[in-house]
Image: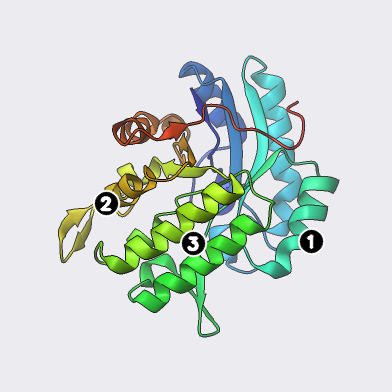
Amino acid sequence: MNNYHTHTFLCKHAEGTALDYAGEAAKRNIDILGMSDHCPLPDNRWAHVRMAMSDLDAYEAQIEEARRAVPEITILKGLECEWDPMYYGFFHDEILHRRKFDYLIGAEHFFKYRGEWNDLGHIRTASHLKAYTDLLLETMESGLFAFIAHPDGFGSGYDRWDENTEACSRDIFSAAAQLDIPLEINGYGFRKPLKRTSQGLRLRYPLREFWECAAEYPIRVICNSDAHRPEDVAASIDLAREMADFFQLKVIETLPLKTPVR
């Protein structure tokens, strides 16, 4: 089993260090552990839910410490990143090339609508869905990211499955197929409180209707825990895999990396 989506205390809403996760991963027979805390941004945007720029060196040091202490597993150095075209140079030059991170995850927790940034819990209308989808497509088209985390995260806000969610989902699948970028079935969604909607209680994500629709496209999926506590380093990956198997989706076990694995 592998898990490429893991957070440390540095993001201000998770627990544990890279070493804590590595120790748990070894106990749970994880072969590859990808550390992927929320990437700091050079303008300090959304600082309450990500590490500070001044923490990057400490984050890298944590990962090197974990590699030395738990050599029996492969530990990768990654980050989960919000997309804005203004950050391209930072991600490409500073993170991937100068600091030589192994991979980046593309993930939208915010979307821009009429010039204002909103979190996904505020997705309410077809126009909101389009703004989210357009941003996610830009993320994929950047070529920087190894996979897209919780692409169905719009379910955190949008109340129902309808023609609008289906349209945005099909745009996402078409882009993922054309660009050959994997989409993540995110295990954290199974551990979050259910969302009360006009169609009853359901997961915020992953959305069954989304992944049922995905089966019509030649895409690849990856199943991760999105761990925010060391004890969750392997949590819900089995449930994500069950969903993928049910809809006969093509699951990748090992993430192809553009930079060599150490």
Judged from this view, the residue extending furthest toward the right is 98
In space, the residues marked 1 and 3 are separated at their CA atoms by: 21 Å
Point out the tag, 1 or 2, that comes first from the N-terminus. Answer: 1
Q: Residues within 10 Å of mark 2 (few under 14, many from 20)?
A: few
Q: Nearer the viewer, mark 1 or mark 2?
A: 1
Answer with mark 2 or mark 3, whichever residue precedes in sequence.
3
**Vertical order, 198 against 71 (above or below):** below
Residue under the point 31% across and 50% down: 207
Residue 89 bears which disc, if any?
1
- Residue 206 or residue 231, whichever sits in front: 206
Q: Amino acid at mark 1?
A: Gly
Task: List the single residue furthest toward the bottom.
Answer: 114
Q: Position of residue 66 (x, y in %)?
A: 66, 27
Q: Residue at x 48, y 65 (%)?
A: 133
Q: Nearer the viewer, residue 57 or 72?
A: 72
**Element carrying mark 1:** helix
Residue 222 appears in the rendering: yes
Amino acid on which disc 2 is placed: Pro
Residue tagged 2: 193
Spatial CA span between label 1 and label 2 = 37 Å
- Name the residue carrying label 3: 109
Q: Is residue 188 left or right of residue 84?
A: left
| Within-10-Å neighbours for mark 1: few <14, some 14–19, many 20+ | few
Quadrant in the rendering for residue 88? bottom right
